[in-house]
Amino acid sequence: MNLSDSLASDPAISGELEWAILARFTQYVLAMADGHVEVEGRAKQTSNNVFVYPLTSLTTIENHTELRFSGGVRFMGHAGMLDLPVRDPIIFIVNGLCRLEIADPDDTNARLQFASGHLVSDATTLCVDWTLDEPGSELFFYRYPSGFPIDPTIISVDGPGTTGRSSPHL
Ligand code: HEM
């Protein structure tokens, strides 16, 4: 399938990002007396704390692929002192490298470089070996350093010419 279309031009394409983000952080938050996780917008939470963000657009131009997802997951606790939203992830894939940005929690107009990974030609995985980048590490008050492994992403794209989970061909 030629994925140089975006959802805007091909509404038959749909997909999602399944991602636990950082399971040990979720456990830390949920272990607090007032700790909880909220999902926002069209994001969903599964019973085993994997979060699902729907795909809103997919664009491929030459060797550059961009997958945009919507919704948010908000980690809260410590009487409001901990409030960490992971909103509107975008995955950029260029020259075999994957880059994951989220909305900057401190600036609604800015993006934050959360993690980096590597492209694999695996039909279900797409990007592997995600590790935190420095701005992502800062969100956790550096309790997880830059380079710290985070949970895998599972990206699915469904539409004409695709069957179930699939990856853009790059
Ligand atoms: C009143 C404020 C806070 C207190 C009293 C507090 C206390 C603690 C304590 C006692 C631990 C060790 C827990 C354990 O090992 O089970 C911890 C771990 C941690 N805290 Fe906080 N914390 C606070 C705020 C925050 C904030 C705002 C963040 C930002 C995201 C944060 C991120 C973390 C992380 C990432 C860990 C490591 C969890 C892990 O083991 O994976 N904390 N905190």
Image: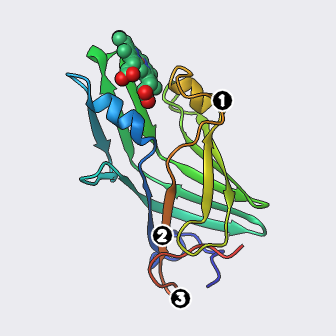
Q: Which residue is mark 1?
A: 134
Horizontal side, residue 70 vs residue 136: left or right: left
Q: Quadrant of the N terminus?
A: bottom right
Q: Which residue type carries mark 2?
A: Ser
Q: Give the crowd class for mark 1: few <14, some 14-19, many >=20 residues within 10 Å.
A: some
Q: CA distance from mark 3 to mark 1?
A: 38 Å
Q: Amino acid at mark 1?
A: Glu
User: Which residue does the image show at 54% across and 32% down from the upper left?
Assistant: 104
> Mark 2 sits on what residue?
156
Ligand 1: which quarter? top left
Q: In this rendering, is residue 156 above or below 163? A: above
**Between marks 1 and 2, how big is the CA–CA gap?**
27 Å
Residue 137, image x, y percentages: 58, 28
Q: Quadrant where the C terminus lies?
A: bottom right
Identified by mark 3, the residue type is Gly
Question: Which residue has dot 3 on it?
Answer: 161
Regarding mark 2 in the picture, which secondary structure is present there? strand
Q: Is residue 83 above or below residue 102?
A: above
Nearer-N-terminus badge (1/2): 1
At a point 52% along the width and 71% down the height, the residue shown is 124
